Image: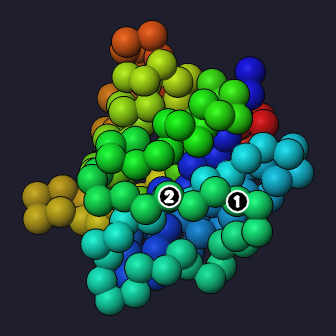
C-alpha cells in the first residue's frame, strides 16, 4: 500500500507558543521524515497560512526540493486544498500524520483523510498541543490518541501507532 507522510503545521510561531514537549516533537517528526525519505515515501508539508508572525516551517525539519507543500486555511488539511488530488496522483492510500495542534488540525486532518477513504496512521508520539484553561496538553493528546485509535469511517480508517511502530 503506497504511503505518504503528512507534516502538519510544524511552523515557527506555533512552536514559539510552547506546545507540550516541543523539543521531543521536533526530534520525532524529523525522525519520521528521515524514515520516510529513506523508504522513498512522499512527504507533504502542510502549513496554515493564517499563522502570524512567522508561519515558516521550523528550520530543524529537513525539507527537500521534491517534497510537496500545501497551504491551508481550515483545520482539516484536505479542506479547500489540493492535498487529496496530490496524494491520489501518486497512488497514496495510507497517510501518516504528525505535527500540530492535536485538538484542532491533527484531529480534523485525520478524520478528513479517513472520510476520503485513506488509511490514516496518527503518530501517537509526534503530535502536540498547548495546555487549555481546564486541561493540560498531555491529557488532550492522550484523549485524542484514544479517541482516534482504530476508528473507521466512510471506507477509510484511523490507527494510532508510535513513531517506532510506523513502517514506511
Write the residue at 52% across / 24% down. 118
Left or right: 118 with respect to 28? left
Tell me where residue 167 appears, x and y as whole percent: 77, 35
Numbered badge on residue 99: none
Numbered badge on residue 67: 1
Spatial CA span between label 1 and label 2:
10 Å
Q: Is residue 57 above or below residue 70?
A: below
Residue farthest along the bottom direction in this orientation: 53
Q: How many marks?
A: 2
Front one among 101 and 69: 69
Q: Is residue 16 visible?
A: no
Left or right: 141 with respect to 66? left
Secondary structure under tag 1 reads loop
Q: Is residue 161 above or below residue 10?
A: above
- Quadrant, the C terminus: top right
Q: How is the image coloured?
A: rainbow
Tell me where residue 34 appears, x and y as whole percent: 80, 58
- Quadrant, the N terminus: top right
Write the residue at 70% across / 70% down. 63
Q: Is residue 6 above or below residue 133?
A: above
Q: Is residue 135 visible?
A: yes
Write the residue at 60% across / 37% down. 87
Label 2 Cα crowd, 10 Å radius (few <14 / some 14-19 / many 20+) = some
Tell me where residue 32 appears, x and y as whole percent: 71, 53
> Mark 2 — residue?
70
Tell me where residue 156 appears, x and y as whole percent: 47, 17
Amino acid at each position: 500500500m503506497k504511503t505518504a507522510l503528512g507534516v502538519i503545521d510544524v511552523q515557527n510561531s506555533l512552536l514559539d507558543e510552547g506546545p507540550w514537549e516541543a523539543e521531543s516533537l521536533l526530534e520525532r517528526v524529523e525522525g519520521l521524515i528521515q524514515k520516510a525519505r529513506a523508504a522513498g515515501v512522499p512527504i507533504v508539508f502542510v502549513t496554515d497560512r493564517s499563522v502570524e508572525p512567522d508561519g515558516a516551517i521550523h528550520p530543524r525539519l529537513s525539507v527537500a526540493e521534491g517534497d510537496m507543500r500545501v497551504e491551508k486555511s481550515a483545520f482539516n488539511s484536505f479542506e479547500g486544498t489540493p492535498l487529496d488530488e496530490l496524494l491520489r496522483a501518486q497512488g497514496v492510500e495510507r497517510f501518516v500524520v504528525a505535527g500540530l495542534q492535536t485538538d484542532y488540525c491533527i484531529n480534523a486532518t485525520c478524520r478528513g483523510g479517513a472520510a476520503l477513504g485513506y488509511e490514516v496512521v496518527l503518530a501517537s508520539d509526534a503530535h502536540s498541543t498547548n495546555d487549555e484553561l481546564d486541561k493540560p496538553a498531555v491529557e488532550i493528546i492522550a484523549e485524542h490518541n484514544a479517541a482516534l485509535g482504530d476508528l473507521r469511517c466512510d471506507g477509510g480508517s484511523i490507527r494510532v501507532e508510535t513513531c517506532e511502530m510506523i513502517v514506511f
